[in-house]
Every structure is written in structure tokens, then in C-alpha cells.
Amino acid sequence: MELSPKTKIDDLLSSYPFLLRFFLAKSPKYKLLQSPVSRKTVGKVASLAQVASIGGLPIDQLLSEIATEIRENTGEEVTAGQGNDGKGEPTRRDEVGVRGAAPEDRKARQEILKGIIMDLHNGEDMEILKQRFHDLAKDVAPSEIAAMEQGLIEGGMPESEIKRLCDVHVQVFQESLESGAVPSTPPGHPVHTFMLENRAAEEVTREISQILDKAADLGEEEFFRQYQGELVQLMERLADIDLHYLRKENQLFPLLEKYNVTGPSQVMWALHDDIRDAIKTARGELAASQGHEALNTIRYVVKSIVDMIYKEENILFPMAMETLSGTDWQKVGRGESEIGYAWIVPEQGGAAEETVSPALKKSAEGSVSLDLTTGQLTPEQVNLILTHLPVEVSFVDENDEVRYYSQVEHKIFPRSPGVIGRKVQNCHPPASLDKVQKIIAEFRSGKKDVADFWIEKKDRFIYIRYFAVRDDSGAYRGTLEVVQDATAVRGLTGQQRLLDWE
């Protein structure tokens, strides 16, 4: 056998298992080789040059000592290649920590990152993992963090577990992430607008934190006597962060998904929902004067929002800037104003200025008409009818892609053009995904044709119906969603036969 600086540690240990004792005696840093997960991940990509670096050993010395150990245990003659190129310069190591590295290096780094997180998942000490990250994969790019999360989900780790570990594994990578540049974008660019909102969110959370700091010096009853009203107002302001998250979910995530970047929408959306639920809970606890519970919930909300800002600006936004083109950012910008903005008025310019053109225009010969089952309508008439119905209509085709929603003036559920062409499974928060999947599966199989739901939303009674759409042959062609504010209808009694416009 011939050893070289490029020999992979897992190949070596697979051929000569007794070398594990050799490495453990050399340095306590080699304890990671005892982990089966590390052997399958880090061991597959870590070269002896990297192993020597981790242990603080000269590569030539390590190669010579390994060769001697193999000869003494097996009698096999082993040659050790030089750790230099013959010109006095060290041989180039497989550098797994360089941004913009070759594809094979990125793949190697992905395996290292997944191995670190798997060990974190299995309870390995945080400081040990931070050191391993520093030794093996420093200067990791934000896009690789997102790809690592996505790879773990695809490998079977539940999204809920990724979410649980999200804050912890960001801590592991924190030093590397903070060494990167915060995205710089022109006014009007979606990222510029998101970051303006983050500054506004930080101001609100700072005001809340300053009030919470006073709780330690006052009894709970006195604290709430003085500050309950102010906290109620601040939590009401903080609830506007929902608009920030809605734009991420409906405008940014769909474009990332087109590049097969699905990790953020799976993990971050779930975290958004946790924050939304916590804000709602905190407001309820404040209203009910549940002082102790309210303080704990508000502290959780503040920390969660601050942590989300960190993830956005150090992982999501830099990764999105690496991934999306200028045309993509124009698409992200479309429809943002329909959802709205949290606390700020966006600056003008940048990628968000392009407007959406009509999907259909009149031909040079005259108006276009559609032949329908009973009659003919122009596209303009079809659009007017759909937007004047007393319900909101959405259509998902047989490929589970959103094809249409009616652009009514006052939407019950926020929608924007970014949703068009998106998989419907990605248009719902993880908590409700199982219901969506079940409805579509039952419709597609022909077992069901209708699914009904009703909820109360801000004192309104909302009736939601899903209908299987089938062609004349009975083949499934999609799902129609109809949403109605049925508050007034629900309250009708008796009869009204005369016109009453008073």
C-alpha cells in the first residue's frame, strides 16, 4: 500500500482497524473517529493532510509513523509518499473551507457539516463540535448551511427536529457566518426592504426588552400595574411582523424552490408559525392579566425574532443573493405591495419596480373570446366575473401547481403573484401540510370530491371548501378552493322578499 497526504482516513481505518488505537493515542482531538456517524461522514472526505492539521502534526511525520504501525502489526510493506512536491513547499491539502471551492470540495464540506449536525443531534458536546467545525470546515458559505439542512431533511431527519436544532447549529457555525459580508442591495430591492423591516423589528424588541428588564426590580403586581398597557401596545405593533414573514413565504421562497432550495421554506416557515402563535398567546395572556405567563412568553417572542433576524441576514439573504438572478428578484418584488410591509414604507428603485403585464391581450384582428360550455366570454369578462364573485377562488392543477387565484379587493388569506406555479404543498405551513396532502390524495384517487372547513378569524366566520375538478372522462384535473366570509350569511333568519337598500 502507498500512503499519501490525500489518503482518506475512512479508507485507511477500514483496511487497518487497529490504527484507531494509534490515532487515539496521538491526540484527544481524534476522538471523533470513534463516532460511527463521523466515520461515515467526516471520515469519507477527510484526508490525512487534514487529519495531521487537526492533530497539530507534520504530515511527513504522521505518514511515516502510520507506515511503521502497519508494518509492525501486519508485516505488510507500506510506502509513505512525501508531504511536499519536492520543491520544499507543502502539498496542497483538500481545502474544505474555501468559499467558491470546486464542486468536489463543496460535496466534501456538505458531508462534514451533516456529520457535525448528526453528532449534535445525538448529544455530542457543543464545544467539541465547534472545534471540529473550525478544524475541518471553517469559512462555510451561507448557501451550504441551507443545503445541509435540506440534505438532512431529504435523508429522513424530520423537519421538526431540524427546527429544534436550528438555533443550536447556527451557534456552531456562528463565527464563520459572521465573517461573511452582510448583503448590500439598492433601495427598493426586496432584501433591502426586508432588512429595513429588521431594523424596525429590532427597535420594537429593544423597547420591549427595556421594559422587561424593569420586572426584576418590581413585584409582578406593581410591574403590570405600571407597564401592562405599554406592553399591550408594543405586542400589537410587533404582530405586524406577520407581513414580513408572509412576503418571505409567498414571494421569496417560491423562487428559491425553483432552484431546488427547499430547506428555508420547510424550516423557516415552521419557525414563523411558532413566533405567530407565541405573539397571539402573549397578547391573550396580557389581556387576561396572566403576568408570570405573559413575561415568559414575551421573552420567548423577543428572542425568537432576534434569532430569526440573525438567520435571515447571515444565512437566508446571502444564500438567496448567491442563488437568484436579477430577473428572479424582479419576480420576488412583484406583488409585495399586495401583502404589505411591516412598519416601514419601502424605498423606491431596485428590483421591485417592474410591474406585472396582463396575461392576455386583444389580438390585432379584434377581441379574443373563449368558447365556454354555455356561451362565450372575453378574457376581460372572465376576469371581471371571477373578481366580483362574493368568494375567493384558487385553482391547483393536476400536477399540484397553483395556476390561479382571484384578485379580489379584500383578501381573507394573503396571496401574491409569487404563488403562481408553486407547488401547493409549499404554500401551506408545515403544521397543515398533512391535511393538504390527504385532500389531494383522496381527490386524485376518486374517493372524495368535497372537503369542508370553517374557522373563526378576527370575529369573522370563514367557510372554506375544496372541490375535486374532473374532466368529462372523470380524470382528475385539479382542486378548486373557495373561501367565503360567511359571517352575515350565518346570521340570516326568516325571509326577505322585498328590495331593501336602506
Image (spheres, rainbow, N blue to C red):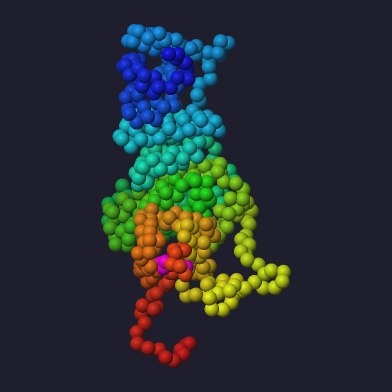
* Image x and y of residue 394, in percent: 48, 65
**Residue 327, relative to residue 70: is it above or below?**
below
Taking the spot 56% from the left edge, 71% from the top edge, the residue there is 383
Q: Is residue 483 visible?
A: yes
Residue 495 among magenta residues: no
**Residue 413, relative to residue 488: is it above or below?**
above
Taking the spot 53% from the left edge, 42% from the top edge, the residue there is 318
**Residue 383, relative to residue 165: is it above or below?**
below
How many numbered tags mark residues here?
0
**Viewer-nearest residue: 311 or 390:** 390
Residue 385 found in image quarter: bottom right
Q: Quadrant of the N terminus?
A: top left
The magenta span reads 466-471
On screen, residue 71 versus residue 412, left or right, reads left
* Image x and y of residue 116, in percent: 38, 32
* Image x and y of residue 132, in percent: 40, 27
